[in-house]
Amino acid sequence: MAGTLDNQHKSSTLQNPADDVTQTLTKDQGVEAFKDITFGSIAGIIGKTIEYPFDTVKVRLQSQPYPPIYSGPTDCFLQSLRSPEGGFRSLYRGVSAPFFGAAIETSSLFFCYRIAQSALRSLDPTLPQGKGDKLPLGALLACGAVSGAATSLLLTPIELVKCKLQYSVTTNNDKNNNNNGTNSASQHRRNPLTVIASVFRQHGILGFWRGQLGTLIRETGGTAAWFGSYEGVLTALRRYTDAAPGLEETEDAKPSSSSPVSHQLLAGASAGVAYNFMFFPADTIKSRMQTEEIASSSSTSSPSSPSTTSSSSTSTKPSLSIQLSSSTSPPKSPVTGNKQSTFYRSAAELWQQQGLKGFYRGCGITVARSAPSSAVIFAVFEGLKGWAG
């Protein structure tokens, strides 16, 4: 009996180190996840504060009907400042949802990026296995794509609400001009909660994922470019500043948080430009899909709207209202039966109306605002991670 107890005690003693290692790994994963979510949320909100006015101008340029309401970003910015909603305040219209979305998006991107790297290391033992070791650039691109694809599912509903709120200022301002301000009361009733209720009432729960394909394309490719550009530029800067005979390959595997802040800012700015420029057409189509109901209701409710007058003009490009009523009917909402354009049909409409230029409307201002915003996001995130250790 005593021998049996001694054996059990020895067995439990031998098992304890393995249990301790498992518990330590689990605890470390939990701590890293907490850092990703917390620091990513903080960085995302700060970055969104910087970029949001420019994002509002971009959405209004992307979503405007044909013929265009604005001649360019500057005209859109000036018209927004003259908006009855309060000038500069109108550029932050609907900012509560994007703040929430920026926290979710950025934290999810960093969290999923790290998880994807861990999963890839476990699948391929030949890859660097150290905690601070960098994976090859090709592997980092793949991890970025996985991170973006996962994040797109969380992002589409938030961007749907954001785009509807941003674009509603344009339509309400146009209605006020045509109706001598009779709709001024209605424009102030739109807020995130009313938009959410309206979408759910008209299209059900799946209505919040309208434009998901555009978000998926943008986030999958864009996030791969985002993380890939950041890691690539950071490595290039490290090689340039540390250039010396016999530079060891391990020098490139330093943690990003150990790089100078100036390097993080420059690499982050490059990442923002790559993310936004490469897949901008998908974002344009997504924005048009998410705001087409507002644009359609605006054009049909105003007797002097651009889409109405264009139907009798000599322009060879059909207006959006004519295209929406064409014989090739798009799918209908399962709740209300209203016609909805698909991703491919929206792309075809835009090409027919505005050509290639239409897909890149608002691209300049988007790229311009993405550089400082992305630079701040990476610098804040890396700085917080370095501070926390």
Image (spheres, grey):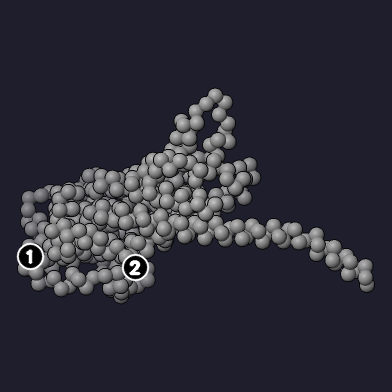
Q: Observer-nearest residue: 305 or 182?
A: 182
Mark 1 / mark 2, whichever is N-terminal: 1
Lateral position of residue 106 relative to residue 23, left or right: left
Question: For the N terminus, which image quadrant?
Answer: bottom right
Q: Disc 1 marks which amino acid?
A: Asn
Q: Residue furthest top?
A: 245
Residue at left 85%, top 67%? 8
Residue at which label 1 appears: 178
Label 2 Cα neighbours within 10 Å, binned few <14 / some 14-19 / many ≥20: some
Name the residue type under label 2: Gly
Distance of mark 1 from mark 2, alpha carbons?
A: 31 Å
Q: Which mark is residue 207?
A: 2
Is 351 located above or below residue 82 in the figure? above
Q: Residues within 10 Å of mark 1 (few under 14, many from 20)?
A: some
Tell me where residue 316 appears, x and y as whole percent. Answer: 12, 48
Circle nearer the viewer, 1 or 2: 1
Is 20 or 309 nearer to us in this picture? Answer: 20
Q: Which residue is drawn at the image coordinates 7% and 65% (left, top)?
A: 178
Relative height, residue 359 to residue 36 (above, below): above
> On the image, which quarter does residue 297 sit in?
bottom left
Classify residue 146 as left or right of residue 366: right
Determine whether the residue tagged by mark 1 lies in a helix, strand or loop: helix
